[in-house]
Amino acid sequence: MLVRFWGTRGSLPVAPHADVALTKVVRALMIARGRSFADEAEATEFARTDLAFSTYATYGGATSCVEIEGGEDAFVVCDMGSGLREFGVGALRRCAEGHPRVYHFFLSHLHWDHIMGFPFFQPAQESGATIVIHTGHPDAEQALRRQQEAISFPAPFDALKARIEFVVHQPGQRFLAAGMQVSLIRQTHARGSFGYRFEREGKVVVYSTDAEHPPGDMDAEGAFETFFTGADLVICDTMYSLGEAVSLKQDQGHSSNVVAVDLCHAAGAKRLALFHHEPSYTDEDIERMHAETLRYEQLVRGERTKLEVVCAYDGLEVAV
Ligand SMILES: [Zn+2]
Ligand SMILES: [Zn+2]
């Protein structure tokens, strides 16, 4: 499987102001002082090896949308945040090259940042396309229709030409979709959210965003450890650092980097992707949180095998 991140920001899409780019360029120029580069390839190599990620790149600002490549004759996509628009543009190109026009979506929940990309999803306007929307919320169709009502959007849901089907699943139920074994778990969040576990050919990817793990709830903790068991990659809501999660943001329906590491360790997961970044965080803030998480993982690892911790950004691809 190949996991492709199209949107990794939580709550609200963000874009950097002009001075953010200027700061990055100035910082890079200062570090490169006295150096010369024969061509762009050499300069790119220098940027990747000698500069911090937050200097030469950005984590991006599109909201939740993650593609899992490796399904059977279909696209597999978790959530429809603003990152979905760009996924759709690429999907049309891939379909022109022969990819089947079948899309399986898995919705964590119906908050706006997780569905706002759908009105801009171009493949939904193709009469030959099939869209299957998997959800744990019986009112998912209502939510998608409502955001395209005339008061909010110029083109109604009913004008979409693709065949669109909603499939409501129960937590704990296992089902087959696009050649993958899928199961879902109910999560603590305003109006509830669902995490998904995808299995195919011995590989496991878990998508678990917008989930709070209240301290002391041992039953829930055990259920998540089971759900994450042996995962090759867990994509986890780590909107806050532990300090914030405990002191300021308790009961806001999100998780922390520390809780994510603890759950992954207990579950024997191999890799964790930090996800659903707080919209007010700068690239430097996110990078700092990633570094803190790496230190924490090392500190509490003990005899366990190392949990690899990656920090998701718009454009990241992880081979599983
Ligand atoms: Zn969210
Ligand atoms: Zn939410």
Image (tube, rainbow, N blue to C red):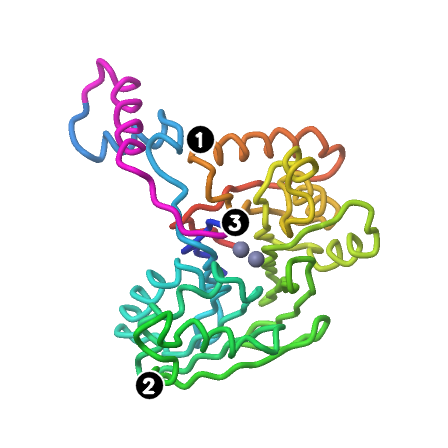
Count residues near mark 1 (Cα–Cα under 10 Å), then give few for <14, some for 14-19, many for 20+: some
The residue under label 3 is 276
Q: Which residues are magenta?
A: 11-36
Q: Quarter-wise, where is residue 119 in the image?
A: bottom left
Say what secondary structure mark 1 lies in: helix
- Amino acid type at circle 2 is Gly
Left or right: 1 as drawn, with respect to 297: left
Residue at 36% from the left image edge and 25% from the top image edge: 50
Q: Position of residue 153 (x, y in %)?
A: 34, 71
Say what secondary structure mark 2 lies in: loop
- Amino acid type at circle 1 is Glu
Q: Position of residue 87 (x, y in %)?
A: 36, 63
Q: Is residue 178 visible?
A: no
Count residues near mark 2 (Cα–Cα under 10 Å), then give few for <14, some for 14-19, many for 20+: few
Q: Position of residue 95 (x, y in %)?
A: 31, 74
- Amino acid type at circle 3 is His
Q: Residue furthest front?
A: 151
- Name the foreground residue: 165 vs 306: 165
Identify the mark at residue 273; answer none if there is no mark: none
Residue at 51% from the left image edge and 79% from the top image edge: 141
Left or right: 182 as drawn, with respect to 288: right
The residue under label 1 is 284
The question of residue 13 being in magenta is answered with yes
Give whichever of discs 1 and 3 has the lower sequence position: 3
* Rendered view: 2 above or below 237: below
Say what secondary structure mark 3 lies in: loop
Give whichever of discs 2 and 1 has the lower sequence position: 2
Identify the mark at residue 128; answer none if there is no mark: 2
Q: Position of residue 154 (x, y in %)?
A: 30, 74
- Name the foreground residue: 96 vs 170: 170
Residue at 59% from the left image edge and 40% from the top image edge: 240
Cα separation, mark 1 vs mark 3, equals 16 Å
